[in-house]
Image (cartoon, helix red, strand yellow):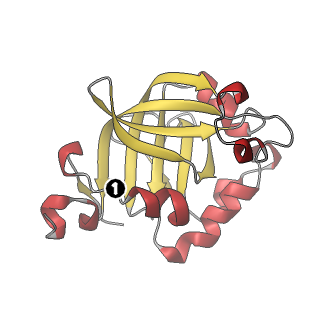
Amino acid sequence: MNRIEIPFDDFRPRALELWGSHWLLLTVGDFAKRDFNSMAVGWGSFGTMWERPFAMVVVRPTRHTFSFLARHDGFTLCAFPERHRGAVELLGTRSGRDGDKIRESGLTPLAARVVAAPVFDEAELAVECHKIYWQDLDPAHFLTPEIQELYPKKDYHRMFFGEIVAISGDPSYSYSFSGSE
């Protein structure tokens, strides 16, 4: 897909759509070494923290991608047109421990511009991040009891904050090109 570079100040993330219904593909590892893994993520955020643009993702320690996040400094988040929903679902439901699920998905990994983790040719949005912070969720801090019900196995997520270092995407993800003010 043909993506344009998008400065963070022009980034129009449509966060509720991306995280809530669109799903994003989190990829961590090293493209050049062919050592990376992807998973679909539906919980996270975009914003500003410590005077830096960031993306925050949450990953359970039981996920294969978790070990990649422990070993690598960067990650990417990619969004896809609806026609690739099946590929994203496959990457979100199969473990990379069990085989080459990225090849099975039919998606095409490409070198990212800044970080070692790849982006995907078919993506309509690619956000590159350098990890700057992590924190384990502490159930003692849940203020809404229903949240605890999402963790029947007590496998609480770890939050990873990544400074956004590059964004490319369809012009609809840019205020400058979308015609929106």
For the N terminus, the quadrant is bottom left
Residue 115 placed where, x, y %? 40, 34
For the C terminus, the quadrant is bottom left
Is residue 108 among the parts visible in the rendering?
Answer: no
* Mark 1 crowdedness (10 Å alpha carbons): few <14, some 14-19, many ≥20: some
Q: Nearer the viewer, residue 157 or 114?
A: 157
Residue ID at (50%, 36%): 32
Residue ID at (60%, 39%): 58
Residue ID at (22%, 51%): 6
Q: Secondary structure at mark 1?
A: loop
- Left or right? Give the position of 121 relative to 28: left
Examine the rendered structure and indicate whether residue 76 appears above or below residue 49. Answer: below
Is residue 25 among the parts visible in the rendering?
Answer: yes
Residue 109 placed where, x, y %? 50, 52
Residue 67 placed where, x, y %? 69, 29
Examine the rendered structure and indicate whether residue 46 appears above or below residue 172. Answer: above
Examine the rendered structure and indicate whether residue 83 appears above or below residue 88. Answer: below
Q: Quadrant of residue 177?
A: bottom left
Residue 31 placed where, x, y %? 51, 39
- Left or right? Give the position of 69 relative to 148: left
- Left or right? Give the position of 74 relative to 92: left
Q: Quadrant of residue 125?
A: bottom left
Q: Disc 1 marks which residue?
A: 13
- Hey, which residue is sitting farthest bottom in the picture? 83
The amino acid marked with disc number 1 is: Pro
Q: Nearer the viewer, residue 144 or 53?
A: 144
